[in-house]
Image (tube, grey):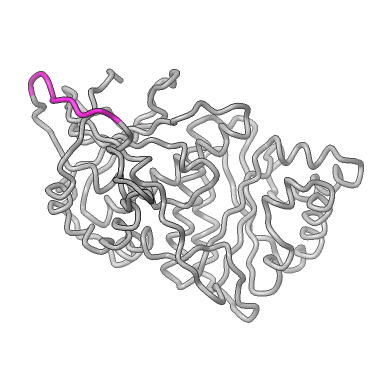
Amino acid sequence: MKPMNESSMRRRDLLACLPAFIAAPMALAQGATPPPGGAAAPMGGMQARPRTGKASVSEGVTIPFAMAACWADDYGALANLRLIAKLDCTIATRCAKSPIGDDEYFTLFISAGAALECIGMLATASMAGTAVFYPKIEEGGDLVVMSVRVGQVKKQPTPEAVASALGIFTRPDPRGAFDAAYKPEAACVEKARICLIDQNTTGVVIADDKRAEFMRAVETLAAASPAFAAAIGPKTLWGPGCTILLAGRGPTATTQTLINAGRGMQKAGLFAHQYGAAFDVRPLPPGLFEAASAKGAEQAAAAKVIAAALEAPGFEPMALCRLGKLTAPQPRAAPPAMQILSTSMESAASAPNGN
């Protein structure tokens, strides 16, 4: 990817081009609220510079889709992402601060994947075509790039796609208590499970007859590791009314694997919203899980029980997930959208190819 000059854009004009975004005006207003005591800084804190060179033959609307990405579920690194909406029909994803260690890389890439899925879901509901490009990662460079071409798709979106796109902005915070009497529809559970499955990733539903043993193993690690306990939350969250799913990744997992895993986790949350349910993802970074497992023989045995639940030899746990119906839905906190977003007026000669 060539370096791109970045500048401010007229967001009002661009928003008017995308009817699908009418569904979320209040959400966007929340994300663009100026900090107390002062005006909002320029998007991404970057200085505006005029575009130079000849305009591309394919310029497009990308800022609304990048805004949708700001409303992705936060898997630990959303605030560290920087989304650059460009006129060459692409949205580049970068990080503001380089990660330190495997666990920070893990949360960065699954968070980037969640943001990418929100872009893709809004594009589907807007009859826009998408493609994903994974450039060679360099210091300060792009992690992943998605192209969005409005009007490319001639097929009307399904009601389910529209519902998922609306859920990007309207779904509540999934981390609350669940209704103990709730029984999810089988289709809802199956969709969530399938969303977690990709190349080098898997997802399983913990069966009722294995639930007690599985939760004993989880509680054993939580009792020995405050960090693990903080990651999964209070024991009360995992009681009746909570369907438990476990996501895992294989030994050959790559950066792309993690980004796709984040996309699947986010997609599962948007699908659950269609059924009036919530999907709460509790990431288990590799270092955190290994440290908890190394506390003693009892913890090592518990870790084996959890890993065995994946039913995939060589795979390791990646996230523990809850599916259920919230008893007291609460709105999610507004994301730091003005910090995450930036824009570029430069158009490349051609958009990247997906792979």
Report the side of 66 relative to 138 (left or right).
left
Magenta stretch: helix, strand or loop mostly = loop
> In which quadrant will I find the N terminus?
top left
| Left or right of 75, for residue 90 | left
Q: Quadrant of residue 206?
A: bottom right
The x, y position of residue 197, in whole percent, is 53, 48
Q: Residue at x 70, y 51 (%)?
A: 230
The spot of residue 252 in percent (x, y) is 60, 30
The magenta segment: 46-54
Q: Residue at x 34, y 37 (%)?
A: 83
Instruction: Estimate the x, y position of residue 19 in percent, counting from the top left.
Output: 17, 59
In this picture, is 18 found above or below 227?
below
| Quarter where residue 189 is shown | bottom right
Residue sticking out furthest to the front: 37
Establish if 224 lies above or below 207.
above
**Residue lying farthest to the bottom in this orientation:** 181
Q: Closest to the observer: 24 or 353?
A: 24
Residue located at (80% from left, 56% from top): 219
Is 209 located above or below residue 227 in the figure?
below
Q: Going by the picture, which residue comes out furthest to the right?
A: 297
